[in-house]
Image (tube, rainbow, N blue to C red):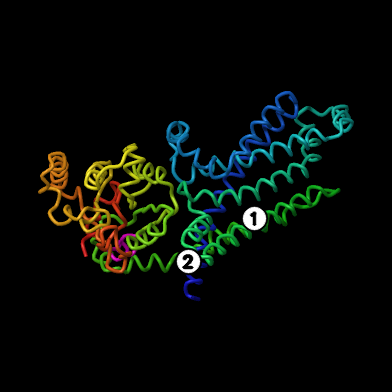
């Protein structure tokens, strides 16, 4: 139990670093966009109302829905014309930026509008230009209210960032989603505590900054700035180094790595939010690690997100279910025999392996004789096409899960080596590591 807890704690630093990076980038963009826009809207009250209404409408969209919406938007616009990936960091950062805009905009407009008109008129009477009035009078007087808005946005962003896991961005949400799915309450609590601690630390730093700019005479913000710098150095520089060397040494010390057999040194494997997906990806990680291939697992992904990530090269492989591919990617609304689902699923781009004949859900006659001997003409045609596809060297390789991975009996009383109709979906990067995934 203690070793399991230690392993969970050791896995927090990289997720914490990724989480903080996402939060800081989203907050920085939101501040860079929100403050100039607030200054412009403070001078044009008629525009302020509609813009705040739009920002409020964005805020009402559930965080997970907003994050998921960014994936097709970036995919359809080719990364907003900038070539950004529709998987992982970019959609998460854009969604969180939109989520953080409302408190920054509203507080900045309120703060600038609350500056005493007599003070502004006195500054103009002293001969100050409009830019000097803004920089030397209005912004300093509105700073406490603006700082409060940024403080609120930071806490919201830290919490919403935990929802970025299903779109492929590693964060503390990995522990929360995986803990909920597998009923690993220790993992869930560690993820929640780490996210809450990060939010409280950022809130305390920004609260000290807000207090400093509110004082008369104005206080020094060097103290909060130094604490923030130490936090960044510890999370990005110190903690990952404490957890990283062991895993790197394990891969570097494997027999295949020392013999120089692996043509690919690192792959990314996706996993959906199901218990067996976590198990299968860990088995793949262990098998590839023994062959000298480092594996990065991206967990808790949605069906369409993980397939699109594979198609666009953001993932190298993932295990999927033929029934899911039948309804989502092939867009079929009616059921079909198992042999037909498997045959058509194998023709999807990126299909690299198929379910073993003994897998659950495959009819007994197909397990005994194989589809090639079936007398039905349509089935024989599918079987013929399948045999022709398998003739290409390396185009189809069976993936056998090691013996400890057997997970009970299937629908026909035969032990399943993979889930029902399970298929390994792999991208181009895995074509050179066929030695790493071979029959047991």
- Disc 2 crowd rating (10 Å Cα; few below 14, some 14-19, many 20+) is some
Q: Is residue 275 left or right of residue 215?
A: left
Q: Residue at x 56, y 49 (%)?
A: 161
Q: Is residue 288 magenta?
A: yes
Q: How far across and how far down the image is residue 117, in percent?
A: 86, 30
Q: Is residue 48 above or below residue 201?
A: above
Q: Helix, strand, or loop for circle 2?
A: helix
- Disc 1 crowd rating (10 Å Cα; few below 14, some 14-19, many 20+) is some
The part of the chain drawn in magenta is 286-294
Q: Is residue 226 left or right of residue 309?
A: right
Q: Residue at x 49, y 67 (%)?
A: 8
Q: Residue at x 27, y 61 (%)?
A: 417
Front one among 166 and 110: 166
Q: Residue at x 66, y 45 (%)?
A: 153
Count of number-bearing discs: 2
Q: Which residue is mark 2?
A: 243
- Label 2 or label 1, whichever lies nearer to me, is 1
Q: Is residue 436 magenta?
A: no
Q: Which residue is mark 1?
A: 199
- In contact (CB < 8 Å): disc 2 and disc 1: no
Q: Earlier in the sequence, mark 2 or mark 1?
A: 1
Residue farthest to the bottom, as pictured: 2
Front one among 154 and 284: 284
- How far is the residue under mark 2 from the one under mark 1? 22 Å
């Amino acid at each position: 139990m203690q070793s399991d807890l230690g392993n969970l704690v050791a896995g927090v630093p990289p997720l914490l670093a990724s989480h903080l990076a996402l939060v800081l980038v989203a907050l920085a963009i939101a501040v860079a966009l929100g403050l100039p826009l607030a200054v412009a809207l403070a001078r044009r009250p008629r525009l302020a109302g509609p813009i705040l209404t739009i920002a409020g409408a964005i805020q009402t969209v559930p965080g997970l829905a907003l994050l998921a919406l960014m994936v097709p938007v970036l995919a359809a616009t080719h990364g907003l014309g900038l070539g950004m990936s529709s998987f992982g960091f970019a959609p998460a950062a854009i969604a969180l930026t939109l989520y953080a805009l409302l408190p920054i905009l509203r507080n900045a407009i309120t703060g600038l509008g609350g500056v005493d008109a007599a003070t502004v008129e006195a500054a103009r009477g002293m001969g100050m230009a409009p830019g000097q009035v803004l920089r030397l009078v209005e912004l300093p007087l509105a700073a406490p209210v603006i700082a409060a808005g940024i403080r609120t946005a930071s806490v919201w962003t830290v919490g919403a960032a935990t929802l970025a896991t299903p779109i492929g961005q590693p964060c503390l949400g990995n522990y929360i989603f995986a803990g909920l799915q597998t009923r690993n309450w220790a993992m869930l609590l560690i993820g929640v505590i780490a996210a809450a601690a990060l939010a409280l630390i950022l809130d305390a730093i920004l609260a000290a900054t807000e207090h400093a700019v509110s004082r008369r005479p104005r206080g020094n913000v060097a103290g909060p700035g130094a604490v923030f710098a130490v936090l960044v150095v510890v999370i990005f520089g110190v903690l990952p180094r404490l957890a990283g060397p062991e895993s790197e040494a394990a891969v570097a010390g494997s027999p295949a790595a020392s013999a120089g057999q692996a043509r690919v040194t690192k792959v990314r494997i996706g996993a959906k939010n199901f218990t067996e997906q976590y198990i299968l990806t860990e088995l793949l990680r262990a098998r590839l690690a023994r062959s000298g291939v480092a594996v990065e697992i991206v967990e808790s992904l949605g069906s369409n997100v993980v397939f699109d990530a594979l198609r666009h090269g953001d993932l190298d492989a993932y295990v999927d279910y033929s029934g899911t591919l039948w309804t989502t990617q092939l867009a079929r609304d009616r059921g079909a025999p198992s042999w037909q689902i498997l045959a058509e699923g194998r023709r999807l781009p990126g299909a690299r392996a198929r379910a073993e004949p003994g897998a659950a859900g495959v009819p007994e006659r197909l397990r005994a004789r194989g589809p090639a001997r079936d007398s039905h003409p349509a089935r024989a045609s599918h079987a013929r096409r399948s045999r022709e596809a398998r003739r290409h060297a390396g185009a189809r390789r069976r993936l056998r899960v090691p013996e400890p991975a057997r997970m009970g009996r299937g629908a026909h009383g035969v032990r399943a080596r993979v889930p029902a109709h399970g298929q390994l979906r792999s991208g181009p990067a895995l074509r050179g590591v066929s030695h790493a995934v071979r029959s047991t």
